[in-house]
Amino acid sequence: MSARLGYYPGCSQSGTAAEYDISTRACCKALGIELADVPDWTCCGSTPAHTVDHHLAGALAARNLLQAEAAGFDRVTTPCPSCLSALKTADAHLADETYKAKVEALLGRPAPGPVDCQSTLQVLFEQIGPEGVKARVKRPLSGLRVAPYYGCILNRPPGLMAFDDPENPIAMDRLLEACGAEIVDFPFKTECCGAAFGMPRLDVMQRLSARILDMAESTGADVIAVACPLCQMNLDLRRGQVNSASGRNIQIPVPFFTQLLGLALGLPEAELCFGKLVLPLSPALAAADQREASRAAEAEAKAAAKAVKNGTLRSEPVCKEDAPCA
């Protein structure tokens, strides 16, 4: 088997969420994780396929697992939770012989054997870990208050996804904390944003996304870090629709967690694609820098006052130019 990790980009990362793909590749390279694209990958069926035909959905995902298997990958990663769910669901259902036979009829060839599929967040957390990230940080995210938002399927159902806590996941928290960020207590980290309901039921997406934005603002977060392209689209690209429906004007930016990770690792901004964010990240970074500067000045003043009190630093009078000092 190849020592490289099979990488399944997925359709969104090749289009509307290209910044997620680009920043993921850049971070993995900087951290020594070698990714190799699954050859001739195709759409996995993602969210809609299983609503039409479960066996067709399985065949769409299984084809990509076959491609990975043929290339010698026994482990595949994808940044997208929907893609991950499709791949892991197909892999699990293929253990059922009846299901497998119907999928093989659609594929026209034998189904793949078991393939270990993991989110890129899981790979970064388990293979590098917070300490490994911390050791490589070049530009700490000091002062930046981050609300980590995992979305509703990255860790669910727990028996299938088998990573982190389904109700209170902490992997993204710990990685960004290792980058120097301040992680706010965000109780809506696994709440649904409305996902694909943004098309058939815009009102549902607006209501659910507004709740997430409102909660993030109430925590004092500067940014909402996400791991899902559809969540990012609802909270960033559709912010105008959400704000309009809720009567609010929340302007918290929503970068992918890999963009923040890459920033902390000192990667060039061209490799992180901040320009693709509808809500710019720069005001949040400026606020964080100002917060850190204020803290540093306050700490310096306290240290000086303590030194004076302890007698280790004498408070000198200020002399006027034409008057002798007392």
Image: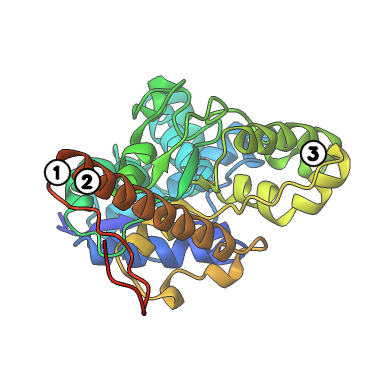
The front one of 146 and 302 is: 302
The front one of 321 and 194 is: 321
Give the label on residue 311, or none.
Answer: 1
Looking at marks 3 and 2 on the same chain, the residue that comes earlier in the sequence is marked by 3
In this picture, is 112 found above or below 207? below
Is there a contact, CB below 8 Å, between mark 2 and mark 1?
A: yes
Residue 137 seen in render? yes
Residue 38 seen in render? no
Give the quarter of the image for residue 95: top left
- Going by the image, does 192 lie left or right of 284? right
Q: Residue furthest left?
A: 312
* Residue 181 location (% of width, % of height): 38, 47
Q: Secondary structure at mark 1?
A: loop
* Residue 52 location (% of width, % of height): 70, 36
Q: Residues within 10 Å of mark 2 (few under 14, many from 20)?
A: few
Q: Secondary structure at mark 2?
A: helix
* Residue 23 location (% of width, % of height): 42, 64
Q: Residue at horizontal 45%, vertical 63%? A: 21
What is the count of numbered marks? 3
Looking at the rendered structure, the kind of residue marked 1 is: Gly
The front one of 92 and 261 is: 261
Rendered-image quadrant of the N terminus: bottom left
Which residue is the site of mark 3? Answer: 206
Q: Residue at horizontal 60%, vertical 28%? A: 191
- Tag nearer the camera, 3 or 2: 2
Looking at the rendered structure, the kind of residue marked 3 is: Gln
Give the label on residue 308, or none.
Answer: 2
- Tag nearer the camera, 1 or 3: 1
Looking at marks 1 and 3 on the same chain, the residue that comes earlier in the sequence is marked by 3
